[in-house]
Image (spheres, grey):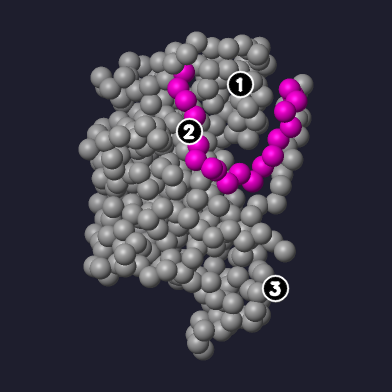
Amino acid sequence: MVHGDAKVPARRSGRHRWHRRSAHSICPILDLYRTSYVASQPSESFIRLQENASWAFGYTFLTAFVYNKTNNPDVYPTMFSSDGDSQPTAVFNQVAETNRQSRNLGPALVRLTSSDVRIIPATGSSLPAGLANWTPGAGGNSYISSITPITNPGGAASLSYADILIGYFEPLLADNSDYQFADGTHFMLVNGASSGTAVQSSQWYHLTFNFGQSGFDSLQLLSRDTGQVELVPLTHLSGSQYARDWNLPGGTGDLFRFWNDGVHSWELGDYNANGAVDAADYIMWRKGVGTAYTPSDYAIWRAHFGETAATGFGASFASQPVDATSISSAVPESPSFGLLVLAAAFVFYSIRPCHNLHRRALKPQLFAKR
């Protein structure tokens, strides 16, 4: 767990700066305020980056001060357009969604410890003080051999991109039988964009892997949207080398662990690797088409729908995820199958002092919209 030497984005215009916390601080304090009710608001990417950068650095707890009235002449609320809480702004919903996603990562983050964190500086930017450049071998292994920002899936290298954070994690405890995703070696990839909306600042990355004699051939992803573990198939290049294109919204990070799928159940349409090709796999495909999956993967799923694969495909581990979607149990007949999107609960972190919070679980307070 990174304590006083960590850096999280401090608010200012343009590229973020990585701000060193004091030596005794063990939880970051989110920096969300404005200087007047007519001043500009923090961007959605900045809001996401404050939390996701913290997780990449190994933090497991955040303190968020939620102002609902003017605190002093230079600190005004961002979540409300006037004193009180009757007029929430767009920032209110953006913070709530960011908190919801962070809570879904919480069961893993509190069971992991930071082993390394590196950065690929933004286009034309210098290396921030106290951080090392990412190179193969970071995190104590050479499984990731390259990380290249690209313009689109299969596209050319991007000429302009934001900082990229890569955090590495190992299990905190030897026994993770209560939450098996915590076993193994993990990494978190964060799009360090701090301006614009999450969609506007999204970025594609081309990752290549060389797993050597490890036996790995795929990744597992802890979905920030559902809290479920999902199989991430990789494209086999040759020998122990694999590749994958991945998209991250601005300020957003994804948590992975290296995995050996063995039988490659995803080739049969079992995209969540639970040993059965069912409607849940369609939903995973539908939500990931264009990023994690291609249109042709739908045909594979449909051809194998209803089949039960052999055991050993892997497992899915969840711990009371906060899910923003609800789905029909009917078998879809075509990719036009609709998803019913429900309103997400609004999530705020409690204000608590930073001391005595060593490795506290991510347990924000939930407030239903009235």
Quadrant of the rendered image containing residue 225 = top right
The magenta segment is 313-332
Q: Of marks 1 and 3, which one's residue comes earlier in the chain? A: 3
Q: Is residue 325 magenta?
A: yes
Q: Quick one: which residue is furthest to the front in this view?
A: 178
- Tell me the residue that label 2 is attached to: 317
Crowding at dot 1, Cα within 10 Å, few <14 / some 14-19 / many 20+, comes out as some
- Tell me the residue that label 1 is attached to: 297
Q: What residue type is labelled 1?
A: Asp
The disc at residue 316 is: none
Disc 2 versus disc 3: nearer the observer: 2
Q: Of marks 2 and 1, which one's residue comes earlier in the chain? A: 1
* Whether label 1 touches label 3, CB < 8 Å: no
- Tell me the residue that label 3 is attached to: 87
Q: SS at mark 3?
A: loop
Q: Of marks 2 and 3, which one's residue comes earlier in the chain? A: 3
CA gap, disc 2 to disc 1?
24 Å
Residue 161 location (% of width, % of height):
45, 50
The answer to whether any part of residue 277 appears in the image is yes
